[in-house]
Image: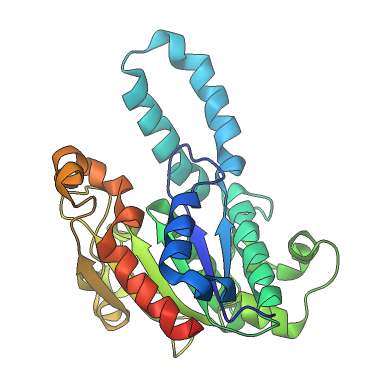
Amino acid sequence: MPKKAALLTVHGMGRTEEDYNAQIVSDLRHRLGQLFGSLHVGKVYYQDVLQPNEDRVWKSVASRVKWDDLRKFVLFGFGDAAGLESGKEPIGSDYAKAQIKIARELLLAREAMSMSGPVLILAQSLGCQVTSNYFWDAHQAAMGNPPRVGIWQDIGRVQAQITGGRPLTGEEISFLQGKSFRLFITTGCNIPIFVAAHAKEDIVPIRPNEHFEWHNYYDQDDVLGWPLADMSDEYARVVTDHAVNAGSGIMGWLLKSWNPMSHTQYWGDTEVLDPLEARLRSLLA
């Protein structure tokens, strides 16, 4: 049977295992029960584009520095952001490779839903910027103003990498540009870091279609997670911010919820899972 909706996850910065979404998928399966069978779940995993190079750099310098764990956090985390945002003009850049990963997962979601159905994307940390960039570029291409970076500068040159060899149809391209993207859930979002130096009028959010909603969850103790709606009038019209206490519960509060470690706790927090479950139930019932 075709799936009724699709949920895609996008991971954040730093060393990330390929099964990064295993716990939240398990939680949603338990919460949704039989309804889970009507949901397609995909994951965007772009860390394999970046980590081998970062590991090589770490091995070359590790013997000459101290504070290994902190340095790994800085090198792997901020190395991800710098690697994706610099040198992104070539069609074969890491920036474009990450976008190909998103396009592949979107195409798989479309196939699982028999060509139509709502797409929800749950993105964490740097994954919010990666996802936003993809749909911003896609929208520019759809408007007849292709960007100079990423796959949407010339989708025809990379379509075989997305499909496995065949050309993309017009309907597939429309889907990949966000025609069915209904809900964007961002957690620990650090988009403000990338746009803070821009003029206010240039800080404009994605809006792939008229039905699109964006809900952003942030913890005040999370120095890498930020509210978005106050950045500009345009963001205020599109994004709804939700302040949460990520990692709540007695043990969570003692260990993580009151400090910057809350950055890693959103996807296990009921303040994020409850509304996500409710939205999925409304689509799947």
Instruction: Name the foreground residue: 194 vs 118.
Output: 118
Instruction: Name the foreground residue: 224 vs 276.
Output: 276
Residue with the most extreme right position = 166
Instruction: Name the foreground residue: 35 vs 214.
Output: 35
Whether residue 117 is visible, yes or no, is yes
Q: Is residue 14 above or below residue 137?
A: above
Q: Is residue 1 above or below residue 187?
A: below
Residue 113 x, y percent position in the rendering = 65, 79
- Screen quadrant of the N terminus: bottom right
Residue 121 x, y percent position in the rendering = 47, 68
Left or right position of 82 against 260: right
Figure colour scheme: rainbow
Left or right position of 160 against 108: right
Left or right position of 200 against 47: left
Residue 66 x, y percent position in the rendering = 33, 13
Whether residue 190 is visible, yes or no, is no
Residue with the most extreme top position = 63
